Amino acid sequence: MTSTLSILLVVSAALFCTGLLAALSRRHAIFILIGIEMMLAAANLNFIAFWRFGPQSAQPIGVMVAIFAIAIAAAEAAVGLAMVIAVYRHYRTTNVDELDQLKG
Amino acid sequence: MNIVALIILAIFTLAAALAAATLPKLMHAALSFAVAFVGVAAFYFLLGAEFVGLVQVFVYVGAVAVLVVFTILLTRTDAQKDRGFNWSGVLVAIAVFVGLLWAIFKTQSLAINLPKAEPLTVARIGELLMTSYVWPLQCVGVLLTAALIGALILVMEEKR
Amino acid sequence: MVNSIDQVFVATKQWLISWLAGTPDWIVQIASALINIGALLGVFLTMFAAISVLERKILGRIQNRYGPNRVGPFGLFQPVADGIKMLIKEDIVPARADKVVHFLAPIVIAAAAILTLGVIPYGRNMTPFSIDGGILFFFAVGSTTELAVFMAGWGSNNKFSMLGAMRAIAQMFSYEIPLIVTVLPVVMVTGSLTPDKIVAAQHGYSLGIIPHWFVIKPWGFAAFILFFVSGLVESNRTPFDVPEGESEIVAGHMTEYSGFKYATFFLAEYLGMFAVSGLAVTLFLGGWQAPLGLLEFVPSYLWFFLKLSVLLFVYIWLRGTLPRMRVDQMMNFAWKFMLPMSFTCILAAAVWHYTGRGWVGWLWSLGVIAIVYLTLSILLDTKKKFAPRTYRFAE
Amino acid sequence: MNSLIVNNIWLIPAIPLAASVLILGFGKSARIEGAAVAIAGQIIALTMSIFAFVPTLQTHGFRAIQNFTWFTFGDHALRIGFVLDPLAAAMLLMITLVGLCIFIFSIGYMSEDKNFHRFFAYLSFFSGAMLGVVISNNLLLLFVFWELVGLASYLLIGFWIDRPSAAAAAKKAFITTRIGDMGFFVGLLWLYQRSGTLLFYNNGGGCLENAGLILLGASATFIPLLIFCGAVGKSGQFPLHVWLPDAMEGPTPVSALIHAATMVAAGVFLVARVYPLFAVGAVNGVTSSLTVVVWIGVTTALMASLIAIAQFDIKRILAYSTVSQLGLMMVSLGVGGVAAGIMHLLAHGFFKALLFLGAGSVIHGCHHEQDIRKMGGLRRLMPVTFATYAIGMMALSGVPFFFSGAWTKEEILDATSHWPKSHLPYYLMLVGVVLTALYMTRQVIYVFFGNRRAASEHAHESPAIMTLPLIVLAFCAVALGVVLTPAWPWLDSYLTGHSAHFDSHLLIQSTVFVSLVLVGAGIAFGVWFYRRSGETDPLQHAQPALFRFLENKMWIDELYARTIIAFAKMLARVSDWMDRYFWDGIVRGLGALGNIFGSLTTTVDERGINAGVDEGTVGARELGRVGSVLHSGQIQTYLGVIAIGMIALLLLYAWLA
């Protein structure tokens, strides 16, 4: 009833939702980043899975996309963490509930 | 593809991910995060994308995780109030998960048998990166450089 | 005959596996892996024991003393005594420590070290885990060490531990870049990330006596030196043992460890040393290949371990000779000298490749390296701007 | 060297123009340097003109052209070019030589002026522009230089800008010539429209060559007449002659150079240059356009001679003389004596420049007094000036055998006498000859003979730098008389391209005796009539009404003031009234209408819309306040909302599927 691909997709969905959970529920700013990284990893997992189960075309597009996604995610993490540090320096807090300067 | 290995790996990875999302101590969560990513890398190995798996370990465990723990170290405060948990997020996450599950099981075309695949060699990936994907590669190079400089400027001591 | 001696270990493994004929595939795979792991652990734990006593004895000779000579003949059983001592010591965990992290740190660090050993070809057909991106695997797993060191420092909840860990991570990060970049010329020239292929690419001899090892090429020689120095830093060896310098911060991230956990750290450090040296041998010194065509009858693994031993001796020799560097000097060295030089190696390798890989290319790449080296030595010359060292004594 | 100049003929105008720019660049303090540069430029131009003149002498019908494309629009290319032929070469030589003399004279005459360098810059500029007119091989290029000449004239007439009369004269000159140029430009465009080219000579394809002339068709009468309008304006022909006497407000060297020798001759030159256009379809050498030219010339010549008799300003007399001589040249051209006209133009250039410079010398000696009634008895005080002036006077009057004007005037009279259409111009010309002798005699008697009057009490001879050019020009005036002797009509043949033979019979013709008698009569009558001239003119005694009529220039200026200018003023007043009351009224009415609408909308705005908008704004603010609650600034909330949106989309999809 369930194919291997479905299991992979379920795992990926679960990883995504875990990431969402981390991003939504935790008060600490770093967790938002961790959650986003997890969501990105889930997307990558999907790319790889579909590449593996898709037709074996001439170019492993899924793999290439995953590689670039990892590189970009690394850049995002670096900048994001730098921002967390900068925000911490400025406001002396990393609690995102207190970082609401943009509220209406 | 060993289904048992897959399921064990899935449980391991998801447990680590859940730990990363919920553990109250920041450092534990960060380390769980690293473990979860090792699990994801293992998935890539299992799926035959060894290179991506290695890159995943290299980038996330070797670099991002260390960055995260460094950030935790540098922003250490009275962490008590940062440990709060927003329960509404759980509901939303579960709702999304249910929605995704429904979508996955609704889709009929996923029942594909694993195709026989040529192993994807590193040489092939390198060749592709230098031919078809050379522009994306250069763009990513520029992006990483920009991110490096941007991160440095962000964390530079503010001159008063 | 020669061939059978060369392949004796391979044959033994196959004989063991043949017992499992008829069982499912995955059982064979797991058995094969277990055999490999067992062999690795057996060999390298023995080597660890040997080197721990040999180091003390060699250092003793360098420092005009005997070194350990009480336990067994020539003190050779000293490691056994040490092992027993370590095992029976009390395992102290600080009260305010993060116990889980504190516990996991030595395990992770040892596991990483052992994993890195897995991809090195020790002899003909003797690569425990032959994977496509072996070199990448080595560094991917090796980078986990940093996390483990951090775990140790953090989990101990001790200022010295934390500071030591920070120092260790800072220097490992800094030197990881030249370490990896100096591998790139080899990878470029061979066109492969697989250690076996890299070793195979160094096969053959010019004029029957000069081996085709990469260390013979100017770029290879420069890269080898840089790689070796970076490896020295990665394994926290003197003169780069700043993170655990006893006279400065007790024992760095290992301060709060005792007993078997401490021994594990020690073990991991030596295993890391073996791994980096092994990789250096693989990449630059022709791996298990014999230095002369005449000497090819000597089994390949013997050549490998001979070369490894030479490198390890150099490690010990340096430890006995050089004083510890200051942190800032070390960092400056990494970013201002090592990094440009390692990029120059890439350039020189490319020049070598495009000028035909012959002796002309040899001279060209020598020229490139010489020019950059001279430029850097002029630019980085501090002109003795250091203040003369002053000594203060208690009155 | 010759070929170098012939192939680079553009250098001749370019050098004075460059000198002009250079002088202006020097600034005010560079007096000597400015003059030196101007004179050096003029000497170079003269030398080059001589080099250009030589090959034209050597070859009959010499014509060198250099054409090039100025710019291209669509399929058409506007081609301009330069031409060197006997006409141009002779003009070049005359202009540069006379110009050089006048430049040198100016050093002395203008020595006390504070804008010394500017004067020389303008003179150089004028010289360059005039040389450009002469060598243009394109009617448009000629027009451009023509206008530059006009500009130079304007600048130089108004050189003493602090004198209101000078400024007014400059304006008058500029505007009057512009009226003529308007016709010129229309003619130019019409010509281009018909023939498709403005090049004069283009190896058979130019507008003056047969191929171009055939294209003119019915417009052949009007195009030359329109171009002639320009010549009328520039050369001070009736009815546009009024500016030329007023132009004497400028410094005397300017009067000599521009308003006697060169620029005013440009009109004659223009007619000569485009003469093939006038001659299209000529029957027996007569066309309707040429007839117009003849009658305008005759009218001008006679009228100007008459006016000259009753003038007291030394320069004005010469100015009217110039006008009359130009009329004479026009007549000559009109009756077909092109060569005669041009020869007279060249000769006139020399002796009229001489006369003007002599007048300048007199004025300089008399401390800038120009009224001949206040002079007198100067022949002993200014002997050099007197001698040279007398030569000029005799050349102008046409005293035969030794003076250049005589022979050229003979030629013109001869040509006029053979005009088949009418003999009236010939007889009128003879009257003009008598009048010329008369007014010149009157002037010389007033200035140089008789008792010394107010201005001549302290008169003195001019310095050598001023008398030297006088002597040179006087020599030229006499020498040309020898050169131009009709016995050997080489210049005639040179200009027309026919071969010349020496023939002493040509020296003695019936017209020679006629003119000899007439000139003699004119001079004798003048000497007798003006023997006792004093503060009041003898003619004034004899015929007060006639004298007043002539003294006031036949009231032509007044006529213009009453008619054309009055009409223009009336138009202006009407326009002013229309603007003030009619259009302004409409505008005001519209404005008032706008005001009414404005107040209406203000009311509507304030009472109706504003109130509504206020209400709306309050509502919007309240809505915003409610809405801004959503805008919590919490990124996690935003993320959650995004996730909820995703669920909603999934649900929508499920519901639809």
Image: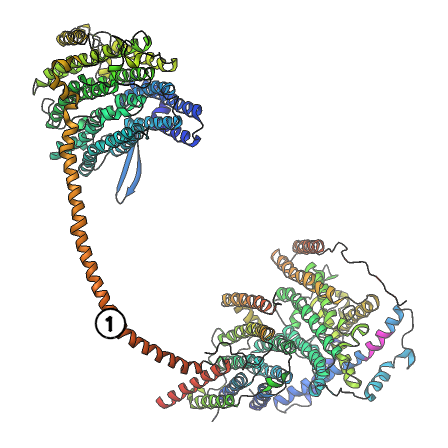
User: Residue D179, located in which quarter of the rendered image?
Assistant: top left
Decide if residue C10 is in sight here: no
The residue pinned by badge 1 equals D604
Q: Residue D346 in the image: x percent, y percent?
A: 25, 18
Q: Is residue A49 left or right of residue C300?
A: left
Q: Is residue D428 left or right of residue B42?
A: left
Most foreground residue, C204 or D228: D228
Q: Is residue D166 left or right of residue D324?
A: right
Most foreground residue, B109 or D556: D556
The amino acid pointed to by label 1 is Val
Most foreground residue, D209 or D465: D465
Label 1 marks which chain's residue?
A: D
* Residue positioned most to the bottom: A1
Q: Residue C168 in the image: x percent, y percent?
A: 72, 73
Above or below C331: residue D647? below
Q: Which stretch is magenta?
A: C49-56
Q: In the rendered view, how is the structure colored?
A: rainbow
Decide whether residue D236 is among the magenta residues.
no
Q: Residue D31 in the image: x percent, y percent?
A: 43, 25
> Label 1: how many residues lie within 10 Å, few (<14), some (14-19) or many (20+)?
few
Magenta residues, dominant SS class: helix
